[in-house]
Image (tube, rainbow, N blue to C red):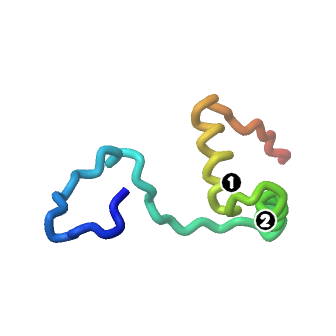
Amino acid sequence: MKKEYDLAKMKEVKNPYPKQKKKLVGINLSPAVIDYFKKLAEDSDIPYQKLIDLYLLDCVKHKRKISMKWVA
C-alpha cells in the first residue's frame, strides 16, 4: 500500500451492485419493536436498523407469511 495516492489519476468505477442499493423509506414501528431490536443491537454490536433489515431480508428469502386471524 502506498503512503499517498494521487486522486487526480484515479478512474471512476461504476457501482457493481446497483440493485443492492438501499432505499430510504419511512415506517411506523411500535416502541416495543424498536426497543427489542435496540437490545439485540447492543448484544451483537450491529446497528438496530441493520438488524431490522436483516430480519426482513430473511423473511423475504424464506417467503415467510404472517398468520393473522381477524376476530369479528
Q: Does residue 62 sit above or below 23 in this rendering?
A: above
> Horizontal and vertical percent for residue 18?
32, 48
Q: Residue at x 81, y 63 (%)?
A: 42
Q: Residue at x 65, y 38 (%)?
A: 59
Q: Quadrant of residue 66?
A: top right
Q: Which residue is mark 2?
A: 38
Q: Is residue 15 left or right of residue 29?
A: left
Q: Residue at x 78, y 40 (%)?
A: 68
Q: Nearer the viewer, residue 35 or 5?
A: 5
Q: Nearer the viewer, residue 29 or 69?
A: 29
Q: Earlier in the sequence, mark 1 or mark 2?
A: 2
> Horizontal and vertical percent for residue 39?
84, 63
Density class for disc 1 (Cα within 10 Å; few <14, some 14-19, many ≥20) is some
Counting labels gives 2
Residue farthest toward the top in the current orientation of the protein: 62
What is the number of the mark on residue 51? 1
Q: Is residue 27 left or right of residue 71?
A: left
> Horizontal and vertical percent for residue 47?
68, 63
- Secondary structure of the residue carrying tag 1 is helix
Q: Residue at x 70, y 58 (%)?
A: 46
Amino acid bearing label 1: Leu
Q: Nearer the viewer, residue 67 or 19?
A: 19
- Is the N terminus in the top left, top right, bottom left or bottom right quadrant? bottom left
